Image: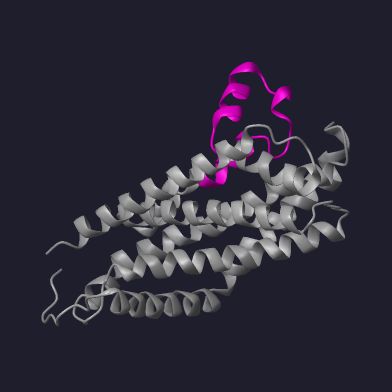
Amino acid sequence: MTAATSLPVHTGPRAALSDALTMIGRSVRLTRRDVETLVMSVVLPLTLMALFVYVFGGAIGTGGDYVDYVVPGIILLCAGFGAAATATAVATDMSSGMVDRLRSLPIRSSAVLTGHVVASVARNALSTAVVVLAAIGMGFRPDAGPVEWLLAIGVLLLYVLALSWLAAFLGVLAGSVESANALSFAMLFLPYLSSAFVPTRTMPAVLRAVAEHQPITPVIETVRGLLTGTAIGSSGVLALAWCTGLLVVSATAAGWAFRRRTRS
């Protein structure tokens, strides 16, 4: 679809920032109105945390309190739910004509991706805070100091940012909202095949190899080590490498796919 009229697009860093802030405000307002998705992105991780802590926790040996072990994994699972919602939101804009309408205005249509990604980070920060407070109510007792908390928050923000750009890429790539849901399924599944809920040493050899070398495990081990004092080893370096690489590749791919789909 081609816009009937086109105005000169804003140029320059200030105009780009203004366009991005406009689309960030729009995405935040859409998030506030989508109460069902917002509630589910919090309720589902809380339900799973209660299930693992109170039902399965007594049968899983981790060498300490199970709630301290499982909370970092639940936090990353929560980020996956939030990012999956970004994929469907981007797919909705791509298929509903919203992007075509933006092209008739003097605004960078690509700012729509920035708006969705920043709103995703804000939504995940809110839901993660709720999950951590609920975990403390369930007995989670992190012994991290201010520096460790800041480092853990930094790792989580980098992970959420990378995952949100990946979701934006999948949203652009998908031909429909249903396809975006299917493509984002892997983000919801990967935490189950990691050290999030059980130590990898308890898994069969093949699954253990996959779990120990997929990108989510070093992120979980780093956050767990920072908050509860367990050994981090090389997980910190691996977590930063995975998140930075995923962020660069996903953001580049999302921009390329967006330009390709919106080309006249």
Q: Residue at x 88, y 54 (%)?
A: 139
Where is residue 224, by image quadrant?
A: top right
**67 versus 135 height, above or below:** above
For the residue pair 179 and 15, the one nearer the viewer reads as 15
Q: Residue furthest top?
A: 205
**190 versus 144 height, above or below:** above
Task: Find residue 163 and report its horizontal and vertical position in percent.
Answer: 49, 52
Q: Is residue 225 left or right of residue 96?
A: right
**233 versus 180 height, above or below:** above
Q: Quadrant of the N terminus?
A: bottom left
Q: Is residue 91 left or right of residue 224?
A: left
**45 versus 187 height, above or below:** below
Please report the bounds of the magenta region as a residue range.
187-215
- Is 59 magenta? The answer is no
Q: Is residue 98 left or right of residue 150?
A: left
Q: Quadrant of the C terminus?
A: bottom left
Q: How is the image coloured?
A: one colour
Task: Find residue 68 and report its horizontal and vertical position in percent.
Answer: 82, 46
Q: Residue at x 15, y 61 (%)?
A: 263
Task: Find residue 256 and report its horizontal and vertical position in percent.
Answer: 25, 53
